[in-house]
Image (cartoon, helix red, strand yellow):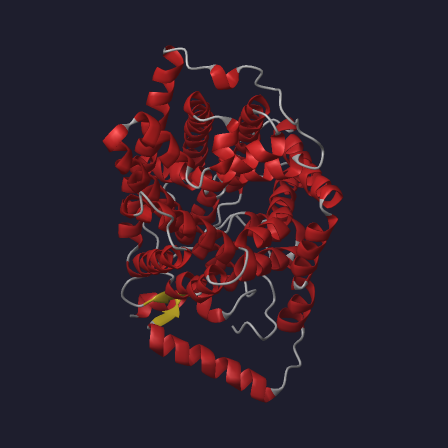
Amino acid sequence: MNFFLVKSMKQHANEDFVSFTWFRRSPRADDNQKMAIFWSHGDFYIRHTQGVLQNTGSVGMSLVIWTVCGVLSLFGALSYAELGTSIKKSGGHYTYILEVFGPLPAFVRVWVELLIIRPAATAVISLAFGRYILEPFFIQCEIPELAIKLITAVGITVVMVLNSMSVSWSARIQIFLTFCKLTAILIIIVPGVMQLIKGQTQHFKDAFSGRGANIMGLPLAFYYGMYAYAGWFYLNFVTEEVENPEKTIPLAICISMAIVTIGYVLTNVAYFTTISAEELLLSNAVAVTFSERLLGNFSLAVPIFVALSCFGSMNGGVFAVSRLFYVASREGQLPEILSMIHVRKHTPLPAVIVLHPLTMIMLFSGDLYSLLNFLSFARWLFIGLAVAGLIYLRYKRPDMHRPFKVPLFIPALFSFTCLFMVALSLYSDPFSTGIGFIITLTGVPAYYLFIIWDKKPKWFRRLSDKITRTLQIILEVVPEEDCDKL
């Protein structure tokens, strides 16, 4: 199989088969719950608290948005729990879109994820790691941007190496970092609760007063809030590696989303017991500003825990998304090399390291946040499409085995919310959203050029094969089906 040649897509209509992957390690159910907690965490600490507040205009409305986004994320997660237990294949929304809507929209989804969204998102959360890890060394002065980017580049490289060397160690470290994340949140929540007990509620007076939310700001407020919770769908990217997915996936998702939603809302409440809305918007590191006012010398520990939390988000994202690229390659929609396994480590090495150069380009390029704003609609458009596919399957394949089943209003409401956010973003910022649409639609000609067109020149085919074989030798990888011959 070669990416540049036509490959007939597998038919999944009545298929209830889960292929064995050689990097499979079958994490225990409790491990998946811990990992799902971490995967439900985005770049929360720097950008999104400020982003939600700035676009809602008041403390009270920002807390409402955080709560609503948590509930909506739970609805999306429950919908994915049904999809993940009904379609027992890795790949998440890519697999579900492929199953329901066919190869073209699935390819467009993985195309924009590989080239733009994932490298940019990894660079953004990694920058949070770089800033917080350096915070204790620059207490009295501004951290140089170059220093942040250099330490960020080191962190990204470490994550890529870790995921390339060992699946089990990557999972173990992820579980340890989950506790670091929960510790970081508790360090903020507990003093915040103590402040409330002491009557420090001045910033909650007239909580809904301020410049007020408007229709232009609400889409961005929802984007920031939903992005902070983003990660609840990552467990579905590794369905084939989950032990007893019919029980583990729903349990892990429900427990993790409950913990994360409560934690995020209480963290924001804690911030406002000590920091005013104006001060929060001006802070470069909200958690550090909060801890410096309440924790004294112990405040130095906060940026370390937050940095470890961000590192875990980097690790979890790479761990999960590499499986998305692996599955897309297995389906013939990405280069063949990305579905190969290291002969000794049994890791999807090419699918991991393909992100490294792309992420580095994003890291040292222009405004990452504008780029993510351009393409935020694409993420929620395709996630909404995947959940809409659940509704379609209910009517098209009513006899399909569904170990976990949610009421139809849950996927319907979540799909409508995703599409509403996309429509509202197009209305409020047509220029940025239009750029995002154009970037996304480049996947359509790419699909016909790389997947459908089967009359490519012989020299092109030979060059493609030679590149694949050379990379196999350099990376020491083989197709999955050849592992049992070694």
Residue 28 shows up from this direction: no
Question: Outermost residue toward the front?
Answer: 140
> Residue sitting at 61 percent across and 53 percent down?
98
Tell me residue 61's x, y (percent). Answer: 59, 24
Above-or-below relation of 122 to 187: below
Image coordinates of residue 34 in percent, x first then y, are 34, 36
Q: Is residue 415 left or right of residue 480?
A: right
Query: Which sits in the foreground, 464 or 204?
Result: 204
| Vertical order, 481 against 60 (above or below) | below
Given residues 215 and 171, the one toward you in this image is: 215
Residue at image point 66% right, 26% down: 212
Which residue is pictured at 55% across the width and 62% down the height?
Answer: 115
Is 152 left or right of 448, judged from the image as shown?
Answer: left
Q: As drawn, is 266 to the left or to the right of 50?
A: left
Estimate the x, y position of residue 257 in percent, counting from the top left. 46, 31
Residue 458 shows in this picture: yes
Q: Is residue 335 above or below residue 184?
A: below
